[in-house]
Amino acid sequence: MKIELAENYGFCFGVKRAIKIAEENKNASTYGPLIHNSKEIQRLDNDFKVGLIEDFKTFQPGDKAIVRTHGIVKEELAQLKQSGVAVVDATCPFVTKPQEIAQEMSELGYSVVIFGDEAHPEIKGVKSYATNGAVVVTSVDELEDLKLHERIALIAQTTRKVQEYMEIANYLIPRYKEVRVFNTICNATFENQEAVRKLSKKADVMIVIGGKNSSNTKQLFSIAKEHCKESYHIEDEHELNFTWFNDKKLCGVTAGASTPDWIIQNVINSIEKSIN
């Protein structure tokens, strides 16, 4: 069996930047998981004494708080700074952009519509920047009963599927006087999704590596499953089932934007051992 990696996979710019910031701030704590990969968070704790705090009120004056890649709620950021906590911002620039758009468009009187998962920390943060509020939707069906202004600003979670975002835009455009569509899906997401689509069309089995709570990894797995029924989402090599590879000729491998190279390599090494 041949193992083939997707053309684009793994750590994106924003995650690489956040990891570097965390490694440079030993003995600090992240507010919420820095990235959606528990193994890498554990490595940062073990090697760099970078802890994890889930409640921002736990930080004390003089503590150092690293803001996670997904960003945080605007009011919580302000409270951290006001309470004397040293804030180190590791928010991905691709997430900062929709925050800025949400605030600007809301102040200009647009109804802000966000395509994404309302429970996701990125969307909680982006929504908080819309001064006059925002609505979050995951499908066209959720738009049908909404009362919106005649002017709409549409923003997407950075890790969503482009095709699904276009469905939302195509629904809104003919129904409102002005619809401003902002392409806030990051390049790495788009490239990783296109790469997994291409690879899964020819693979006999697909392995998608990443945190089970990682939005972008779940999107990659969804795309892989569309084209290759035998697709599996795992966090690391310990979740491999070697019967998956019986009588297979091509195994495709991809990984989410928060999956470190060392985990990817461990998975590949384990697959190779099982087929040799």
Image (cartoon, rainbow, N blue to C red):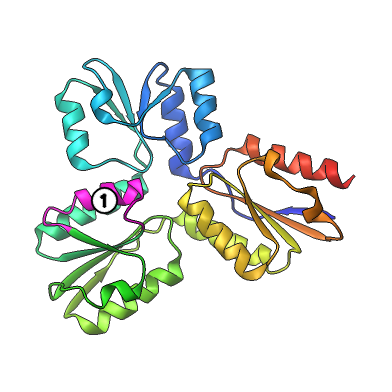
Q: Is residue 82 above or below residue 155?
A: above
Q: Is residue 28 left or right of residue 126?
A: right
Residue located at (9% from left, 64% from top): 109
Residue at (49%, 60%) from the top-left corner?
190
Secondary structure beneath label 1? helix
Q: Residues within 10 Å of mark 1 (few under 14, many from 20)?
A: many
- Residue 255 lies left or right of residue 179; in this view the side is right
x 26%, y 78%: residue = 144
Whether residue 142 appears in magenta in the rendering, the answer is: no
Q: Position of residue 123 (x, y in %)?
A: 31, 52
Occupied quadrant, residue 244: bottom right
Which quarter of the rendered picture does the C terminus lie within?
top right
The x, y position of residue 2, in whole percent, is: 82, 55
Residue at 53% x, 19% y is 46
Q: Label 1 amino acid?
A: Val
- From the viewer's perspective, tell me whether residue 109 is left or right of residue 58: left
- Find residue 272 and report its horizontal and vertical position in percent: 82, 44
Q: As displayed, is residue 174 above or below residue 60?
A: below
Choose top left, top right, bottom left or bottom right for residue 196. bottom right
Which residue carries the number 1 mark? 126
What residue range appears in magenta? Answer: 117-133
